[in-house]
Image (tube, rainbow, N blue to C red):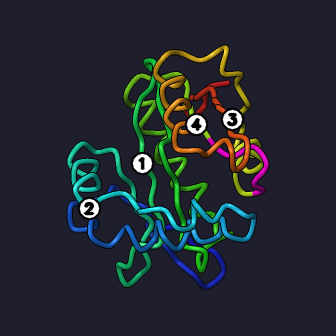
Amino acid sequence: MRRTGTVTARLRRGSPADAPKLGAVERAAAARFRAVGLDVIAEGRPTAVEEYLALAEEGRLWVAETDAGIPVGLAIAGSVDGEGYLAEVSVHPDRGRQGLGRGLIACVETWALEQGFQSLFLTTFRDVPWNRPYYEILEFAVRSEDHVGPDLRAVRAGEKARGLDGLSPRVCMVKTLRRCGAV
């Protein structure tokens, strides 16, 4: 349970029952991009229910939910180039700035360590305040595309093909993972 003020949320592994509910969270979180001129993100289609089902079955989906069991955030994990990959983190804007994104990312970091990964990669918008600057606070660092492996280069190529770089520059980021107590 994560308590922030009088608000509580529970972070847990996603289940197949969550799949039909998560698109609404994703759409609400994406709507924030309208404020920075990234309407194409705000109007994009959310992840398909079938994909959420597969992610839940594979243990690569986490959900933040209210006391009433309503999903208000999600994170998706994967792997690229033999390391962990944070494919997505979305929090409903009504529940923003309550530590849920940070908590969901921590869940993915724990998963990555359990998988034996030493690093966690992601791609994000360079200039959107709740993207690159936020991840830097969480100890992610920008990594040049010249210094990433073929899987992450393929992710970036897909983003470029969808026109994301034409909207706002995107960057690769990486965090070296540490086990609790490790210095």
Q: Is residue 53 above or below residue 155?
A: below
Give the mark nearest the N terminus, 1 or 3.
1
Q: Nearer the viewer, mark 4 or mark 1?
A: 4
Q: Which residues are magenta?
A: 124-129
Q: Residue 17: x, y in percent?
A: 21, 68
Give the mark nearest the N terminus, 4 or 2.
2
Secondary structure under tag 2 reads helix
Tag 2 near tag 3, CB within 8 Å? no
Q: Which mark is residue 171?
A: 3
Q: Which mark is residue 49?
A: 2
Secondary structure under tag 3 reads strand
Q: Is residue 33 above or below residue 142?
A: below
Which residue is at 45% across, 53% downward? 75
Secondary structure under tag 4 reads helix
Q: CA distance from mark 4 to mark 3?
A: 11 Å
Give the image quarter of residue 4.
bottom right
